Image (spheres, rainbow, N blue to C red):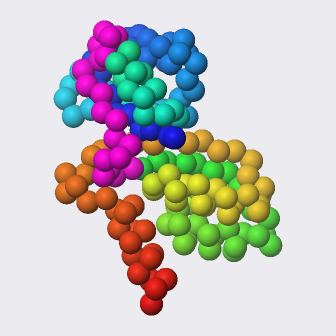
Amino acid sequence: MKHTLSVLVQDESGVLSRISGLFARRGFNIDSLAVGPAEKPGISRITMSVRGDNRTIEQLIKQLYKLINILNIQNVTNIPCVERELMLIKVSAKKIDRSFILEIANIFRAKIVDLSNNYLILEVTGDPGKIFAIQRLLTEYQITEIARTGKITLIRESNINTEMLKKSLDRKTLNL
């Protein structure tokens, strides 16, 4: 199962290296990693996606707490959160395909950030499912480059799990 960890650290050199070293020593792969300044100066938030069962992730969190500069760790996998990711995707855009690609971009609210005679670069922001969906649709055309930020997340104070709402609404729609 994929888990999402939100880690607050003191913003000092070497902290990310120590964390990635711990994962490497334990044989874990980090599927997604995003690091940036947090709400207080001198503190950074690391959001990472890691695969493992609940027991393994609990052990990993205990090991992370032993590292210096770690302030707080939250496993936000089953907590209602807002999740976002950014992707830049360069697609071969021959004249015959361009209108179809632009239509896909419009549906996904992607921005065209560069245009040439043969290529388009799209900027897509959204939850990981949206990123996956547009990337999958664009594979019909020639994707030449992709750059992704990795998932970032914050806990919803409203405690409303929008994923559960979507599933509930989908079920109701299907029963109509």
Please give the range of residues in magenta: 65-83
Would you say 146 lies left or right of 71 here? Answer: right
Spot the residue most to the front. 55
Residue 36's place in the image compared with 155, above or below, is: above
Magenta span includes 69: yes
Q: Nearer the viewer, residue 13 or 2?
A: 2
Place residue 42 in its image quadrant.
Answer: top left
The residue under the point 40% across, 68% down is 166
The reply to whether residue 11 is visible in this rendering is no
The residue under the point 64% across, 56% down is 135
Q: Position of residue 97 (x, y in %)?
A: 76, 70
The residue under the point 79% across, 65% down is 94
Total residue callouts: 0
Q: Position of residue 151 (x, y in %)?
A: 45, 42
Would you say 50 lies left or right of 73 here? Answer: right
Place residue 96 in its image quadrant.
Answer: bottom right
Magenta span includes 163: no
The reply to whether residue 166 is visible in this rendering is yes
Spot the residue most to the bottom. 176
